[in-house]
Every structure is written in C-alpha cells, then in structure tokens.
C-alpha cells in the first residue's frame, strides 16, 4: 500500500520499547530482591524511591524505558499521519528508520555506560530528525 513503508520503523520502535521493558525487569527484579525492597512499603512512603535503593546501573534501564514513552509518542503520531496521507515512503521512511536507529543507540548508551553528553547528542539528533518528519507532515497537510 502506498505510503505505508513508514509503519515498519514505527513497529520496530514499539518492539524495541518491549526489549527495554524486558531488560528493565531482568535487572530490576533481582536488584530489588537483593536490596530486600518491600514494594508495598514503598508506595506508602512518599519519600521512598527506587533511585535511592537500587544501583544506578539498574535504574538506567527503567529511566530509558520511561524515555521511550516521551518524544517517541510524537514520532508515532507523525508516522501514522504520514502513512494515512500516503506520504510514508521514500525520504520520510528513511528519516523514520534514522530516528529509530538513534533512539536504539540512545537506549544502549543510557542502559550501559550512561554518558550524558553522548546521550544528549543522540537525543538532539533524533529530535532534529523528528522535526524534519513533522515539517514534512506539515507541508503535506497545509
């Protein structure tokens, strides 16, 4: 179907989000067990935070999982819009794949070494790509 190629990178980022979800729990559950965290006690204490209890390397995965529900929501919207109007092929599909690649690399950096400046550059680049997709969508609908 014309304009639907962009749906592939959308599904790829959704799948990557679930990979990060699995990685988060694979790291977090054993760490919570080792730290003897009582989840029920945590919800009753407004000052309680897993950031204070668990090692940073464990929390980095959870923080990245949360990040995959922020700016990528705009990516999903613009990708769907471009697919609906038949503009999801060619350059827009390529830009979408670049966006996904940058977000995956961002995830890997955050979940492992967590170098903030590297993450910032990756986030900024992905934001420029996202802005280009939004510009293309705007040019098509206005």
Image: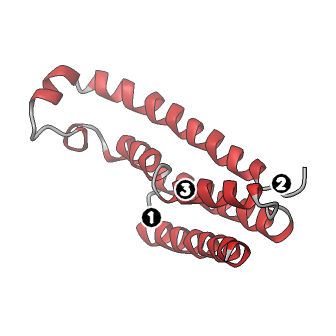
Q: Give SS at disc 1.
A: loop
Q: Mark 2 against mark 1, which lies toward the viewer?
A: 2
**Mark toward the start of the polypeptide (1 vs 3):** 3
Q: Position of residue 142 (x, y in %)?
A: 67, 77
- 108 or 21: nearer the eye? 21
- Using the image, determine if residue 116 lies above or below residue 110: below
Relative side of 6 to 25, left or right:
right
Q: Position of residue 136 (x, y in %)?
A: 70, 75
Is residue 30 found left or right of 23 in the rendered image? left
Answer yes or no: do the residues labelled 1 and 3 have beta carbons within 8 Å?
no
The residue at the point 45 percent across, 55 percent down is 70
Q: What's the CA distance linking mark 3 and mark 2?
A: 18 Å
Specify the label residue 5 is tagged with.
2
Q: Please indicate, yes or no, whether residue 78 appears anywhere in the rendered image.
A: yes
Could one spot residue 38 in this view of the protein? Answer: no
Lower sequence index among marks 3 and 2:
2
Which residue is found at the position 38% from the left and 25% from the top? 29
**Rendered image: mark on residue 115:** 1
- Image position of 26 (left or right of 137): left
**Between 46 and 113, which is closer to the camera in this rendering?**
46
Q: Dot 3: what SS? A: helix
Q: Give the spatial CA distance, label 2 vs label 1.
A: 33 Å
Q: Disc 1 and disc 3: Cα gap in Å?
A: 21 Å
Instruction: Identify the residue position indicated by label 3 in the image.
Output: 72
Image point (75%, 50%), residue name: 7
């Amino acid at each position: 179907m014309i304009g639907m190629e962009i749906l592939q990178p959308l599904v790829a980022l959704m799948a990557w989000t679930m990979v990060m979800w699995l990685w988060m729990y694979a790291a977090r559950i054993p760490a919570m067990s080792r730290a003897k965290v009582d989840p029920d006690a945590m919800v009753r204490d407004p000052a309680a935070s897993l950031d204070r209890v668990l090692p940073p390397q464990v929390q980095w995965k959870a923080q990245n999982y949360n990040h995959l529900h922020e700016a990528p929501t705009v990516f999903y919207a613009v990708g769907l819009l471009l697919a609906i109007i038949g503009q999801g092929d060619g350059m827009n599909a390529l830009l979408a794949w670049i966006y996904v690649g940058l977000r995956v690399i961002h995830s890997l950096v955050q979940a492992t070494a967590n170098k903030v400046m590297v993450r910032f550059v990756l986030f900024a680049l992905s934001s420029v790509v996202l802005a280009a997709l939004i510009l293309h969508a705007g040019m098509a609908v206005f």
